Every structure is written in structure tokens, then in C-alpha cells.
Amino acid sequence: MESIPVRELNQHTSAVLARVAGGESLEITVSGRPAALLIPVDDNSRGIADLVRRGRLIPATDPAPPALPPGDLDLSIDSAEVISDLREERL
């Protein structure tokens, strides 16, 4: 990812935004330190932002994946066999 100083962003805003709209991600620096990221907006993120704004979606607060159930996993179980057994029980 390319870094550009905030001065360049101020002086060439249209050109920088055209690059981002074209798919580039840029890091904006202030006094040589990263201050912001400019990333392209895709249709997916617009949809999510719209759902959050309308209160239909609550963003995750914990970035960690969900924990696995406690205990050892039995990897020898054949899921197709389990499903077949469950279907036979319904009949």
C-alpha cells in the first residue's frame, strides 16, 4: 500500500480520489506517521453500512472467531451417515 502525505492529498484531492475509485488503497500520513486509510467503497460495504445506519444490523464488537465447543472433537464421524440416520428416525 502506498503512503502519501496529507499535503499531497490537499493539493491533488481529485487525482487521489480518482486513484482510490480505481481500486487503489492509500495510507495518508501526517508528519511521516500514518493517520488514515483511503480505501475504495464496494457495493458490499455500502449495503452493510446502510443496514447499520437503519438499525437492522449491529456490528460485531469482538473480532475473534467464535470459540469451539469444549472437549475433543471426534473427526472419525461421517456426517453423511449421521444425516442418514436422522432421516431414518423420522420415518
Image (cartoon, rainbow, N blue to C red):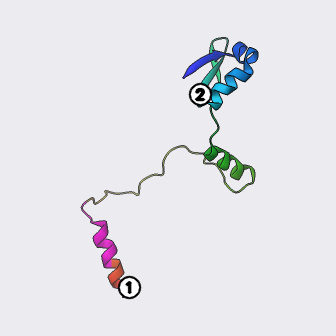
Counting residues from the start of the chain, the first of labels 1 and 2 encountered is 2
Range shown magenta: 76-85
Residue 42 placement (x, y as % from top left): 62, 41
In the picture shown, does residue 13 fall above or below 54? above
Q: Amino acid at mark 1?
A: Arg
Kind of element beneath mark 2: loop
- Tell me what residue is drawn at x 65 percent, y 31 percent: 21
- Tell me what residue is drawn at x 70 percent, y 14 percent: 8
Quarter of the image containing the C terminus? bottom left
Residue furthest to the top: 31
Quarter of the image containing the N terminus? top right
- Crowding around mark 1 (Cα neighbors within 10 Å: few <14, some 14 to 19, many 20+) is few
Residue bearing the label numbered 1: 90
Residue 80: which quarter of the image? bottom left
Q: Is residue 38 visible?
A: no
Residue 62 placement (x, y as % from top left): 57, 45
Q: Is residue 15 magenta?
A: no
Residue bearing the label numbered 2: 25
Q: Main secondary structure of the magenta part?
A: helix
- Tell me what residue is drawn at x 27 percent, y 58 percent: 75
Residue furthest to the bottom: 91
Front-most of residues 50 and 64: 50
Q: Nearer the viewer, mark 1 or mark 2?
A: 2
Q: Disc count in the image?
A: 2
Front-most of residues 90 and 6: 6
Q: Amino acid at mark 2?
A: Ser
Residue 20: which quarter of the image? top right
In the picture shown, does residue 55 fall above or below 64? below
In the picture shown, does residue 57 fall above or below 43? below
Q: Marks 1 and 2, how far apart in space? A: 54 Å
- Crowding around mark 2 (Cα neighbors within 10 Å: few <14, some 14 to 19, many 20+) is some
The mark found on residue 3 in the picture is none
